[in-house]
Structures are given as structure tokens and as C-alpha cells.
Image (spheres, coloured by chain):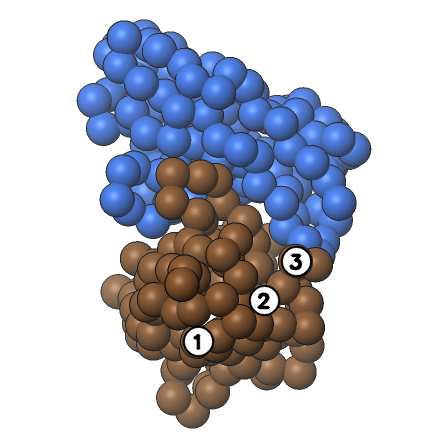
Chain colours: A brown, B blue
Amino acid sequence: EVQLVESGGGLVQPGGSLRLSCAASGFTFSNYWMSWVRQAPGKGLEWVANITPDGSDKYYVDSVKGRFTVSRDNAKNSLYLQMNSLRADDTAFYYCAREVTGRGIDPWGQGTLVTVSS
Amino acid sequence: EIVLTQSPATLSVSPGERATLSCRASQSVSNYLIWYQQKPGQAPRLLIYDASNRATGIPARFSGSGSGTDFTLTISSLEPEDFAVYYCQQRSNWPPYTFGQGTKLEIK
């Protein structure tokens, strides 16, 4: 069974940093693009970033460029999101998700909540 | 950036009836349009990819249609478990992938 389990969320002050992790299992992690998608409480979905299977290329939504960094460790079947200079509008559930080429984002993890507040 | 507009924002339908949800793109996305279902407290689930292809394990009552800028998700006969929020997403022109704002399907 394909599983994605996020961790690392929590309460952080504006301007602070947080690193999210995602542990993948049940599939050959190194073969897949991976994404982070976020959802502010009660709001819609926003794609944040993705990364190629070998980690050589990374793409971001404009609102996080220069502040967030996506990375992966294929030996550990893990995906990461380093978040710096956090702002109140970064408050959201952050989902780790696998991209299936030619299809879509499937599956999604259960999400981890990041709250940016003083 | 491609903007996706979903309508209506909320749709009230009785179980057993048909539901039709719309997604309109600000420019052509060809058929690279995806639909997801999200239930309260859960992560989204892939329903339909490339406008009309059901994902693995998705019941036949879910169907998608459209191309270019106008797309439709149809649920032919609503089951109790179908009441949820539905999002469309485009993968035609990225980054960024963009999502619609969602349609909440509620019980009438």
C-alpha cells in the first residue's frame, strides 16, 4: 500500500523557520516526482512546490520562491520542505503528494498543520 | 498563470439524483484537467485525470468531460458518500499547477 506520512508541523512565530518531512513507503520513491500542496484552514488547495525524481530540478509557486526549499533523500524514501521567513499567510495544512506522470497527484498524505502566529 | 473557476460554489442535490459540476479555465488547458474529491478531515483523492479518465477504483457513476476551457464532472446517481468538496486542477501550463476554488456538494 502506498503511504505518505508528513511530520514537522507546529506553531512558529512570524519570520521563523520550520522543516517538514514526508516518509514514503509502498512504492519506488526514486521513480516519482513529488509535490507539496497546502490548504489554509477552511480554504482551497494551493500547489507549493515539486521536485524531479533525482532531485535535480525544483519548481515553486511564486509566493514561496526564495523562502521555501524542497528536497529529497531517495536513500531514505523521504521528501522535505524547508520553510524560512514564515508569514501568517503560510498557515495551512501541508500535504506531501506523489505525482503520477500523465495523471495527477495521487496519493496525498494526511497533512501536517503549520501555524504561523505570534 | 491559468485561473480555474468552478461553479457553482455550493450545489444542493438529493441522494439518487444527478450532480453536474463545472470548471472553466482562463485559457486552453487542452485535456489536461484533473478532478479531486475531498471529504471533511481527509486529504484529497484523485477522481478523474485528463478530463475524462477515471482513476483506479473510482466508481463508474463519476464521469468527466470537456476540453479546452470548459469541463464538467458528472455524478450520475449520488450516493451518501459522494457529498464532499470537489476541486479541479490543470497540469497544462506549469509551474504553477493551479486549482479551482472548489465546489461543495451538499445534501438537499
> Disc 1 marks which amino acid?
Leu
User: Dot 2 surroundings within 10 Å: few (below 14), some, or many (20 or more)?
Assistant: many
Q: Position of residue A99 (x, y in %)?
A: 52, 60
Separation (CA) of disc 1 from disc 3: 17 Å
User: Dot 1 surroundings within 10 Å: few (below 14), some, or many (20 or more)?
Assistant: some
Horizontal side, residue B51 vs residue A105: left or right: right
- Are labels 1 and 2 on one chain? yes
Separation (CA) of disc 1 from disc 2: 18 Å
Q: Secondary structure at mark 1?
A: strand
Q: Secondary structure at mark 3?
A: helix
- Are labels 1 and 3 on one chain? yes
**Which label sits in the foreground, 3 or 2?**
3
Q: Position of residue B36 (x, y in %)?
A: 44, 39
Q: Residue beneath label 2, please?
A: A50
Mark with earlier residue (1, 2): 1
Q: Residue beneath label 3, please?
A: A63
Q: Is residue A79 visible?
A: no
